[in-house]
Amino acid sequence: MTAALGDPDQWQAQVIPLTAEALARKCTAIAAYQSQVSTFFSDTADLEAKVGGYATQVGGERLWQPHR
């Protein structure tokens, strides 16, 4: 990872809040790829619960950007 991304300390997390609509669209987008559902979740309800739970835990969508 370091070879590809450089020093981890050079990256900064930014959290973007997600509306209920944005979260629903994210789940719909993930569910469009059945291999994602069958690989990472037991079904779409599990997908929605886990993605929603993570968004609640993080406070939205976490993006990583290089320090400026």
Image: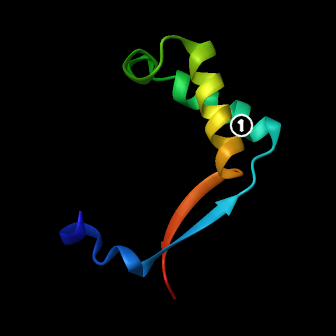
- Residue at (37%, 20%) from the top-left corner? 39
Q: Nearer the viewer, residue 36 or 46?
A: 46
Residue 30 in the figure: left or right of residue 4: right
Residue 54's x, y, as percent?
61, 39
Quadrant containing the N terminus is bottom left
- Seen at 38% across and 19% down, the residue is 35
Q: Is residue 44 left or right of residue 1?
A: right
Q: As drawn, which residue projects farthest toward the right?
A: 20
Q: Is residue 50 above or below residue 5?
A: above
Taking the view exactly as shown, the residue that stands out farthest to the bottom is: 68
Q: Is residue 62 above or below residue 33?
A: below
Q: Position of residue 10 (x, y in %)?
A: 40, 81
Under tag 1, what secondary structure? helix
Residue that badge 1 annotates: 23
Which residue lies at the image location 65% right of the left edge and 50% below the top edge? 58
Q: Nearer the viewer, residue 32 or 60?
A: 60
Name, please, the residue furthest toward the front: 57
Q: Quadrant of residue 3?
A: bottom left
Q: Amino acid at mark 1?
A: Leu
Above or below, 58 relative to 39: below
At 23% from the left and 69% from the top, the residue drawn is: 2
Q: Quadrant of residue 53?
A: top right
Asked whether, in this view, residue 8 is left or right of residue 65, the answer is left
Judge from the rendering whether residue 67 lies leftward or rightward of residue 49; answer left or right: left
Q: Position of residue 7 (x, y in %)?
A: 30, 78
Mark 1: few/some/many CA within 10 Å (<14, 14-19, 20+):
some
22 or 17: which is nearer to us?
17
In the image, farthest residue toward the left: 3
The x and y percentages for residue 27 are: 62, 29
Q: Is residue 8 above or below residue 68?
A: above
